[in-house]
Image (cartoon, helix red, strand yellow):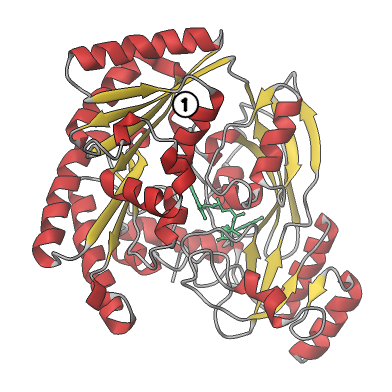
Amino acid sequence: MTHTAWLDALSRQLGPQGLWRPGVEADAAQLHAHEVDWRGRYHGRALALARPASVAEVVTVVQACAAQGVAIVPQGGNTSLVGGSVPDGSGQQLVLNLQRLNQVISIDAANLSMVVQSGCLLSQVQAAAQTEGLLFPLSLASEGSCTIGGNLASNAGGTQVLRYGTARALCLGLQVVTPQGQVLDGLSALRKDNTGYDLRDLYIGSEGTLGIITAASLRLHPQPRGVATALLACEDLSQAVALLQMAHHHLDAGLTAFEVMARGPLALVQQHQAPAAAALSPLLDPRGAPPEWVVLIENTSCESDAHAQERLQLLLTQAMTLNLTQGVVVATQTRQRQQMWQLREGIPQAEKCEGLMVKHDIGMPTSEIPRFVTEVGQALQARWPQSQVVCFGHLGDGNLHYNVQPPADARQGLALEDFERAVNTLVFDAVERCQGTLSAEHGIGQLRREELAQRASPVALQMMQAIKKAIDPAGLMNPGRVLR
Ligand SMILES: Cc1cc2nc3c(=O)[nH]c(=O)nc-3n(C[C@H](O)[C@H](O)[C@H](O)COP(=O)(O)OP(=O)(O)OC[C@H]3O[C@@H](n4cnc5c(N)ncnc54)[C@H](O)[C@@H]3O)c2cc1C
């Protein structure tokens, strides 16, 4: 069957809201948002956009694609930072967007769990848990746009991993439509289940290459009763790492976030997102010298705000006594706390205003981070004195966003490609020396596929290829992502 006749047949099954064919149900502008990634780096062209509103419709689409040999690109909120959720330029891949599967199915407060469809926005999932006085702690700057299905498919991290773990730790079970169009019903709400291989864990982080996540059973937590947040100035990352170690001992499970931001990204937020910057503490007072590094620390308590503040204050006092910080500001109102977070979460948007950067979301043992940042910073300065490092991230998780702004003469075309290749080699060689990972958060997608192929252990790669072949023998699920 020709693709046109095949699409006509699919359209009859899904209706005009369920399938957008270019130039038929949707114009170029409507499709554009689904064909270009968040960073504006990958520009694809879709054969069509499927928008199923039920699991049965997902099955219909997947079975039709399997029969016709059409590749599928699963898509949630399309906030992937590695080009995982947009089609290639061939015009032959079908984008399957899950955002119409957006129902909260149930909340079991006694079991601390909930079941949601995969197209629910992360913010919607958080709000639904909150209505029951519970917490779904996954928290990302993109939470108003990304979906829980995308979070699970990319095993998202965010700002509370230190206390609650990544998306994987927050998932009890999954419903998945396999590449053959069968429904794998694993919406278990169990905390313990040792019956064979863990298929849920296989799908978490699989980036749409093994099937479509249609619903998830999620682990909830009690809402903390108190929270205390502070910004601290540090001279260098060794100080920040020593502070982190002290915070673990003083706050234990209360420590929910330990974020770090260098002077460079703070300046970008000030430049591009003035309201958040205006809220900044005297730490960043324009009359004083801005600190080299700022730590954002958050402590929660199951008792009260006063208790959370008291515990944090003890830590801060000791840190000042031991000279581990050059200045501290504690948020005294919710508004101040929000502004502190805007400062941290405004960085990706502020970076976007600066144009393309060579981005990394590396991970390594926290103890290695100061050495890594010093050595790589020196190497970059020696080779490209005009480049700028924009470094920030989840220090508490050993995860840094280590982004490099190219010098003016290498900002486009081949010069940018050469610069990116050389910087990546330098950064990832150093990551390997520190026993780290080339992606702690954003995943592989298209962006890191070649590096994974070059740098992962051959045994691990063979096993990944074998799993892909076993589950998706026709190679129709997000081809060219993660694996070559
Ligand atoms: C401003 C900003 C801040 C961010 N901060 C963080 C952060 O702190 N931590 C972090 O980990 N990430 C972060 N990210 C990236 C992050 O991965 C996503 O925001 C989010 O997890 C992706 O969800 P999504 O619904 O947008 O998925 P998409 O971008 O649509 O897809 C992501 C991947 O999952 C696949 N996929 C999507 N839905 C499904 C499904 N239902 N079934 C199977 N496969 C699917 C896609 O094919 C793709 O490979 C950030 C992104 C932005 C833009």
The residue type indicated by label 1 comes to Arg
Furthest residue toward bottom: 2
- Against 91, residue 329 (above or below) is above
Q: Where is the C terminus found, in terms of image quarters?
A: bottom left
Instruction: Answer whether residue 344 is visible to the viewer in this image.
Output: no
Can the viewer see residue 429 in this picture?
yes
Residue 62 falls in which quadrant of the image? Answer: bottom right
Left-right relation of 390 to 385: right
- Secondary structure beneath dot 1 equals helix
| x and y, in percent, of residue 435 in the image | 23, 45
Residue 409: x and y in percent read: 23, 77
Using residue 398 as the reference point, say whether residue 202 is left or right of it.
right
* Image quadrant, ligand 1: bottom right
Q: Position of residue 90 (x, y in %)?
A: 57, 86
- Extreme residue in the front direction: 287
Quadrant of residue 416 within the rendered picture:
bottom left
In the rendered image of this protein, does residue 314 appear above or below residue 448?
above
Residue shown at 57% from the left, 41% from the top: 198
Q: Residue at x 38, y 60 (%)?
A: 461
- Furthest residue toward left: 382
Query: Does residue 402 lie above or below 393 as drawn?
Result: below
Q: Tell whether 378 sits left or right of 20.
A: left
Instruction: Indicate the position of residue 146 as horizontal and vertical percent values.
Output: 61, 52
Q: Viewed as shown, does residue 308 lie left or right of 315?
A: right
Q: Is residue 309 above or below residue 284?
A: above
Pick the residue in front: 416 or 409. 409
x 49%, y 72%: residue = 480
Residue under label 1, please give it: 163
